[in-house]
Amino acid sequence: MYFVEVAIKVPLPRTFDYKVDSQLGEASAPLKPGMRVLVPFGNQRKVAVVLALKTTTEVPENKIKAIFEIIDDTPILSAEHIELLRFTARYYCYPLGETIHIALPSALRQGESPDKTSINMVALTEKGALLPSLKAKTQLNLLKQLSQSGKSSLTELKALGFSKKTIDSLIDKALITQSIEHDNHWQSVAPTVGSKPTLNKEQAVACTTINQSSGFSSFLLEGVTGSGKTEVYLQCLEEVLKRGEQALVLVPEIGLTPQTVNRFRRRFPDTPIMLWHSALTDNERLQTWRFCEKASCAIVIGTRSSIFLPFLKLGMIVVDEEHDSSFKQQDTLRYHARDLAAYRAYQHKIPLILGSATPALETLHKAINNKYQLLSLTERAQTATDNQFKLLDMKGQPDQAGIAHASLATMRQHLKRGKQVMVFLNRRGFSPTLICHECGWLSECKRCSTSATFHKAIGQMICHHCGDQYHVPHQCPDCGSTQIFPNGKGTEQIEEFLSSEFPQTPVTRIDRDSTRRKGSLEKALDEINLGGARILVGTQMLAKGHHFADVSLVVILDVDSGLYSCDFRATEHLAQLVTQVAGRAGRSGEAGQVLLQTHFPEHPLLQDLVNNGYQDFARFALREREDADLPPITNMAIVRAQGHNIKQVVDFLTDLVPVSGVTGIQLLGPIPAPLEKVAGMYRFQLHIQAQDRRVLHQYLAQMVDYLSTSKLAQKVRWSLDVDPIDMI
Ligand code: ADP
Ligand code: ZN
Ligand code: ZN
């Protein structure tokens, strides 16, 4: 008889010991860490993952229970992987059992067999390769896609927006075929490499430095948009593939940037590349998981959670647009994929490349302190000149729908020259509130401390925080007046105005509302790239990674809301957003023009950004953080609590504040959250800060222990966020 330490999905910060009866061990394969077992838990049977075998336990003999059954023949998690998950659970103060549950594909959570390692591939037939003309445009697009990318998995085509129906109709026409491929170990033959440009000097230095590094090293590849960062990744990956190793490429969102995926495909046409993102089915997740584990795929391009994929021989991790907030999970296990990537690279002793035009201050801080090696690309690869920024003072400016007449005039000039123009406003809907002209009534959400947004096209008021919908009132609920007007601007209103102002010019809007239907984003992007759309209106969905060749002017409508916010990161996020949006202009040939509309043109942040660029702004902002003792100079965690009873929420947090203070720890709170009420619940926070990360983690570990027994904790919903990236 011996014992095992297992992790079970329960909200407790601990693991559990069970005994293994000797005859159970004989009946199946010898038990090893990483295998799943069935155990009694209370009066339930639960799937558990074995963490360690041991000969002794602290659980008294009459209390210890025996496992029922061993599920696996071989471990589903390697020792290294268990270590990663232990680290994750410890760092983010989250129960290990739940951490493992989140990391595993759902089939494995439930105890299903891991052996489903076939994959559906689609390829052109000879007839299809001739690209016959077809009436259905999406069918033709699919043929074109396959002729560019070669054989592709069904999963990948779906990620690119092609429906099962489109695929099936082409199979019926014998233009494409479908086949099932089994997991055959990827052979490390020299990969075929598609045509590639000669690197410029800075790119060459970056590639050589990365390729010549040995063991664990992190690089910050800081390069303005269009400076050829992706080209650097590709040429570094080539070396990784030549060594027969695998690579993980983390990207913010795959659906938004199918172009990136295609570039990888074209460069390495016969290398198995898999995608990982939220639209995969359970089965596809399991397949990808297993292909990684067996080294049947060489490159994974994935969103946040791909950081938990198992790799047999990982050779490099790339995090593209490393500043992007989508790498941080904002509920349950609040991990940051970029930071876990650093841990994994350290574990595997491999290079990590973090690339961005607008590095997060966290990353820049590490680069300045030589924890990460800084590699700079200062020139745009295909454009000789930089974009020209101009601050447009809105004070006293005549405007229509929030667009200054001066901006409209500039737009006209660019459109006349056959160029595309982008108008950016980070607020969807028609207007953020309705207001009564007689009494000042505002359309507030009944359950949140915020207003409900007017969506004119669908004739509804929608709260963007709780999702509640309301009828659009014809009369003021307070005074009965019919003088109710939209107050403030959203993208829907901008689109409506521009369509009437430029009746001959096609306007395309891209935001979460306009792209809700499947395939609509792809359609809109196609329209833009094929030149149909001339004016593009959108939210930050437009800012991310797209390559719009013809955009020569970007108008940014409302930068002021980011200048005066209670979140100390607001200015950093504003600067990143402005720089990223601006980066969409002037991507081929001539320099683009960027207009920033503001009431505060003399604001030092805007001046710095416009005159000296993000690089300079970021270094200045870091010094400000230093003076104010804020992250990333110090380390932070937030305890958030919410509940219907405001007193219980405040009491819960007050109870966590020690009367006499703790050395090395600064506490702030309980304070109301910036949005004090959402969906009927009151929200408060406690901010915890420490100079020393170890001190912070010791403190948090004790607190989590205490919380698992606290009665007050059971009356509210609480969460702990380590390294939070926003204050909401
Ligand atoms: P980033 O990832 O920094 O935005 P990309 O790698 O996408 O930049 O490069 C922008 C454009 O410049 C792409 O069309 C790319 O093919 C091209 N490009 C990159 N490096 C070079 C180079 N050395 N010579 C010529 N063109 C290049
Ligand atoms: Zn009124
Ligand atoms: Zn609401």
Image (tube, grey):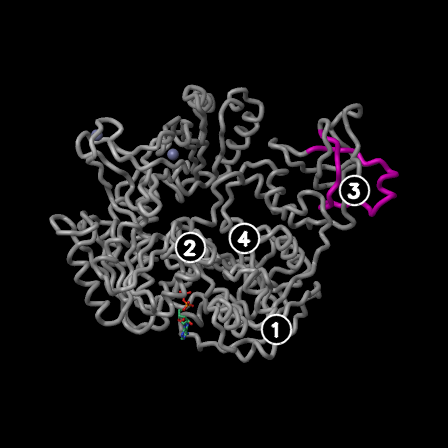
Any mark on residue 367, and which? 2
Within 10 angstroms of label 2, few (less than 14), some, or many (20 or more) residues?
Answer: some
Question: Ligand 1 near label 1 (Cβ, under 8 Å)?
Answer: no
For the record, the magenta segment spans 16-41
Q: Is residue 160 left or right of residue 223?
A: right
Q: Is residue 511 above or below residue 527?
A: above
| Residues at marks 2 and 3, CA–CA distance in whole angstroms | 47 Å
Q: Is residue 368 magenta?
A: no
Marks 2 and 3, the one that precedes in the sequence: 3
| Nearer-N-terminus badge (1/2) | 1
Amino acid on which disc 2 is placed? Ala
Q: Which residue is at 19% across, 47% downward?
A: 600
For ligand 1, tell me if the residue under mark 3 lies within 8 Å: no
Q: Residue at x 59, y 43 (%)?
A: 102
Which residue: 36% across, 63% down? 225
Picture coordinates of residue 442 (x, y %)? 26, 33
Looking at the rendered structure, which numbered label has been put on residue 279? Answer: 4
- Disc 1 residue type (three-letter): Ala
In which image quadrant can residue 31 be found? top right
